[in-house]
Structure formats: C-alpha cells, structure tokens
Image: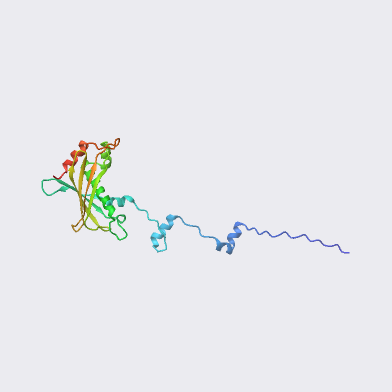
Amino acid sequence: MNAAVVGVPAKPRSRARTAAQRDASPVFRKRRRPRRRESATLAHDASHHGTSSDRRRVVVDPMEFASRRVRPSPVHEAAGGGDMQFRTRRAILFGDCDPGGVVYTPRIAHFVVEAGLAFLSHALGAPAERRLFSFGILPPARALSIEFLHPMTWDEAIDIDVTVERVGEHSFTLAIAAVNAEGRTTFRGTITQVAISPQTRRPVPLPDELRAALERVRIG
C-alpha cells in the first residue's frame, strides 16, 4: 500500500503592498491627489495667466486709502480783512456711500468732525487729538448742525472750508462748508466743542494756547 502523500499547505498570499508597489500600480497612481503648491506659486501663476478661475489674494495697504481721505491744502486768505481760512480736500470713498453710490447721510457728520480735527491740527501745529489731551481737557461736541444741499457720489473730490465762528469762555464753534469740483456747495454745517475736565466732566475755561490759536484764524 502506497503511503499517502501529505502535501504542505501553501502559504497564503499576503495582500499587503509595499509603498513602492502601490506607487507602481496604475490603479493607485490614479487615486493619488496632486500635491498643492504653495500660495505664493499660485499667486504667481494667477498673475501671469489671469484666468477667471484663478483665485488671487489681494493685499491692500490701508495707508494708501487713508492718504486719500483728507488732504489739507495750504491755508489761504479769506475775502477781506486778511483773515485766514483753512481748506482741506477729501475724496469720497466707496465705504462712504449707500448702494446707490451716493454718500450715506450720517457719513457727512463724520466729514464735519474730520475737517474740524484737520483744522485744529493745523492751528495747533500738531495732531489735534494728542494736543488737546496734552492741555488736560476733553473736547466733546455739544452741538452739531448740518444742511444738506447737493448729493455727493463715489470717487468725487470735495473741498471743505473751515472757519472759526465763535470763541467762548468754555467752548468754540467752527463753521464748515464743502464744495464740489463744479463749485456747488454740497453741505454746510457748524460744530460746537466744549472743554471739560477729565476728572469732573464739567466745563472748564479754554486753555490759553487753544484760545490763542483759534483767535489767530478767527473771521470776525
């Protein structure tokens, strides 16, 4: 009787693949996703190819736009008496406007305050906010009046004239008027600011240096 031949069971085939085998396989090559390039490379390609599907990140320098907002022009003599009048130029920015491209009404109040500070900076020979605080006072507005005369639109430039209307014991009033490139007055306004004590929040006399600066440019 022949002895039975007992076969040695074959070793099961391992399904594990090495990294080299996976890379060599066309199936795995199709599934691999391309590595993302650095954003700098994408920005470079986008700037060169300029296709509509490219996504580009635009970095905006805020100082470029800030420099367009208020540009003081040289102080010039007002009509009669040799008194001085201050003029500043402002560009109407997109953020100043409503969806129709016309200046949003509350922004004009900001124009008035902005022009007043530019005037005081000129009169005091230093940034107004810091100079007023150095006097030991706070200068809040007590009254603000604006008359809207003509619409202003995006990218338009306006000239804003500022004069001293009144100098009191504790307060002063500035008169402000803006004109467009065609010479039409777009708005007029006045703003009254009061000197108060930071401690008591009560009115105090105008500092001598501030009063002298206002009187120098006051139109009687």
Q: Is residue 146 above or below residue 6?
A: above
Q: Residue at x 33, y 50 (%)?
A: 62
Is residue 102 or residue 92 the one in the foreground?
Answer: 102
Residue 80 image position (x, y, % from top left): 10, 48
Count of numbered badges drawn on the protein? 0
Coloring applied to the structure: rainbow
Looking at this view, name the residue that lies furthest to the right: 1
Task: Using residue 26 as the reference point, say whether residue 94 is left or right of it.
Answer: left
Q: Is residue 193 visible?
A: yes
Q: Is residue 14 above or below residue 122?
A: below
Residue 63 image position (x, y, % from top left): 31, 50
Is residue 16 or residue 154 the one in the foreground?
Answer: 154
Q: Residue at x 39, y 61 (%)?
A: 48
Q: Quadrant of residue 10?
A: bottom right
Residue 191 image position (x, y, % from top left): 23, 47
Q: Is residue 127 visible?
A: no
Q: Quadrant of the C terminus?
A: top left
Task: Using residue 70 as the reference point, say whether residue 6 is left or right of it.
Answer: right
Is residue 88 or residue 162 the one in the foreground?
Answer: 162
Q: Quadrant of the N terminus?
A: bottom right
Is residue 17 or residue 138 the one in the foreground?
Answer: 138
Task: Using residue 5 as the reference point, say whether residue 88 is left or right of it.
Answer: left
Looking at this view, name the residue that lies furthest to the left: 81
Residue 5 image position (x, y, % from top left): 82, 62
Q: Quadrant of residue 166?
A: top left
